[in-house]
Image (tube, rainbow, N blue to C red):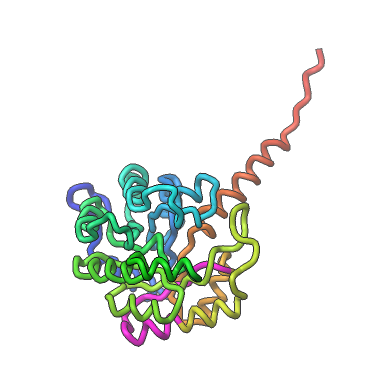
Amino acid sequence: MPNPWTGKGNPYTRQEVRDRLQATLNQNKAIIAAGAGTGISAKFIEKGGADLLIIYNSGRFRMSGHGSTAGLMAYGDANAVAMEIGEFEVLPVVEEIPVICGVHGSDPRRRMWHHLLKVKEMGFSGVNNFPTHSIVDGHFRQVLEETGMGFDKEVEMIRLASKMELFSIVYVATPHEARQMAEAGADAIIAHVGTTVGGSIGVVDASCSMDEAVERTQAIIDAARESNPDAFFLAHGGPINTPDDVRMMLEHTSAHGFVGASSLERMGVEQSLTDLTNQFKLITYSTNPS
């Protein structure tokens, strides 16, 4: 329903976002959520028919020509960047679809309840846990967990968002994390199977094969469904890059759709700008004889 103050769609209530996604499924269509790092990306992703827009700090790095993993590094205030992109670039130009704010839930400097109030006041319709420590592993992950900056903080943020009636769509990398988020009340679970392959700044080798991605995605869905059968389930990352890849995932798993960030925003810009510039450069001319 339109915002009575602006006439535009945002913000939506948690139930309104859920109803919109369910309406997409009722039409036998896949749910497509997209990351946007700029206003023009958001504007034309919406025009292409996406169901949700997710704004987080990696989008800014991605659209500045850097790898999305930069969003996990100490190159800026992730929460402030997401809010800035939302306030000054995306929310002013999006006409109708819900916009979700990436929240760095383990940021020790934030009173999370206070930050989520600002997210809601800004006009976002929900939250996403990014940057997420779910995709960090090894010794560094252990250090984060032991020093109070681990994945549990992201779960707590989602639990708080649920109490505040904010829609939540979350990244998880394991069945255990999926179960934790489902129990915290997450509305949509994204099975993250690795950094997206391809393009100029994507990884070269997938962290898993397509068969492994199918297996891992389904294991995550099964674990989350035990705790919250009403959640929406989405695929993301690794070898899942093109529309054909997504079709394969939906045919072989119980996923309801796909989240595309690099695979939608970055890949689209890289190839289209290259091709268009090349077409201009193919233009030749001849001088008129005197």
Q: Residue at x 36, y 49 (%)?
A: 77
Q: Residue at x 19, y 65 (%)?
A: 164
User: Image height check: is 232 above or below 290?
Assistant: below
Residue at the far top: name it. Answer: 290
Query: Does residue 1 appear in this view?
Result: no
Residue at the far right: name it. Answer: 289
Q: 102 left or right of 277?
A: left
Q: Nearer the viewer, residue 137 or 25?
A: 137
Q: Residue at x 42, y 72 (%)?
A: 172
Q: Which residues are magenta?
A: 220-238
Query: Does residue 238 appear in this view?
Result: yes
Please provide percent x and percent y for residue 1: 23, 59
Q: Quadrant of residue 125?
A: bottom left
Q: Nearer the viewer, residue 205 or 225?
A: 205
Asked if the stretch drawn in magenta spans residue 198, the answer is no
Please provide percent x and percent y for residue 6: 22, 47
Asked if the stretch drawn in magenta spans residue 223, the answer is yes
Q: Residue at x 54, y 79 (%)?
A: 214
Q: 182 left or right of 29?
A: left
User: Image height check: is 222 above or below 173?
Assistant: below
If the image is split into quadrants, where does the C terminus sit? top right
